Amino acid sequence: MDRMKEQELAWLRTITGELSTLTLTRLDDTLPWYGSMPPSRRSAVGLVAQTGIASFIQWYEDPTSTPWIASDVFGAAPRELLRSISLQETLQLIRVVVTVVEERVAPRSESLREAIMHYSRDVAFAAADVYARAAEARGLWDARLEALVVDSILTGESDDELPSRIAALGWHGDGEAAVLVGTAERTVDVDQLRRSSRHSGADVLIGLQGTRLVLVLGRVDPLQREAGDDEPLTFLEIAQRLADGFSDGPLVLGPTVANLIDASRSARAALAGVAVARSWRKAPRPVLADDLLPERALAGDGLARRTLIEHIYEPLAAHSGELLETLWCYLDNGRSLEATARELFVHPNTVRYRLKKVSDVIGWNATGAREALILQSALIAGSIAQSGRKPGSGGK
């Protein structure tokens, strides 16, 4: 090391305190976000600035210390500082420090000016690397947490920590939720699925378990929906938009539930639907799990049997025994209005009116072939359950 450089190093060490003071003053004067930070965070930012100045002197003495810049400058800062200031704010911090040092030091010699510019570039790259590593670590953690949440929803083994885990993922869903289950390759573009979901007005949690792909869909708060979206899409319409992200095979959408915490019920129905979807030869894709109630009930799905009884049989029985009898006769007579009217000794228009009333009460239309199968399954399941009750018990 030549004598001039030794003199410059000695001089730099004598003005270290002055540079630190000037830097902190300049930060307070030029960066509004710095002035609004709590004292502990301001102290941490100041420490980063002071460390950067000291590290520059060390680097000027030995330029081969470049690999240690990141740990020198950012290692002294507490971990939470990375969450407090963005990469853009960090680069603003570096710019202020470099400007202060350059104004005070550069006039002394051209070599110092060049050293400052070279060092500032290395520190900027080091800052970007620190934030990239932090983002990667956060991404891996979020992926593990998301997989844990989806698994809890699928198994129904939710605990008191589930809401906090969901919140930690930045879930924006508000209110209703539904689960979409299908198959996909390991190379599925989950980022594209997230973008499509957001564009459709839904938030999404994604779980890829082998070849099974699970999407937990939730409503996005109306204030967060894109401008121009008047009415929110139904979950079935959202599922249709996402269908291209799945491989060929059954794609089943579970029933809508009140909130994400109750999504396990939607997940159970969707999983049961996937298991039997191929039994419906012309099933649409995606298909609603509730449109597969007969197949699910035959496969031993208790949830499907309860749904048939509670959503179809019991509402009809409670509303009118006349409607229940008319539906039985209509289905037993091959959906013939005339044959049903003859058996009941009424006019065909009366049968037609009662069937419309049935549709109003339960939401299913008995005149359609597929819905007729669902309704007949409900009548069978309900009558079996009814006959299994003890007389006068009134229980379910």
Image: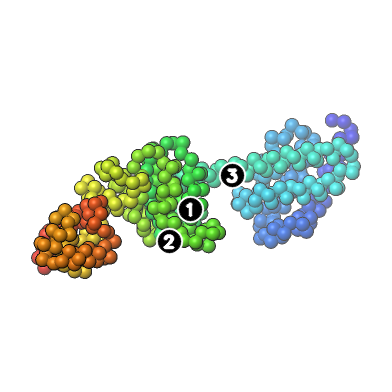
Q: Residue at x 36, y 57 (%)?
A: 256
Q: Which residue is mark 1?
A: 200
- Dots 1, 2 in contact, CB < 8 A: no
x, y percentage for residue 309?
Answer: 22, 59
- Give, as a three-letter code, the residue at label 2: Gly
Q: State the mark number for residue 63.
A: none
- The percent position of residue 58, horizontal first and vertical second, equals 77, 38
Kind of element beneath mark 3: helix
Mark 1 is surrounded, within 10 Å at the Cα level, by few (under 14), some (14 to 19) or many (20 or more) other residues, namely many
Horizontally, is 88 left or right of 238 in the view? right
Which of labels 3 and 1 is toward the front? 1
Q: Residues within 10 Å of mark 3 (few under 14, many from 20)?
A: some
Q: Is residue 258 left or right of residue 347?
A: right
Mark 2 Cα-neighbour bin, 10 Å: few <14, some 14–19, many ≥20: some
* Quarter of the N terminus within the rendering: top right
Report the Cα–Cα distance between label 1 and label 2. Answer: 16 Å
Q: Is residue 348 above or below residue 302?
A: below
Which residue in the structure is indicated by mark 3? 134
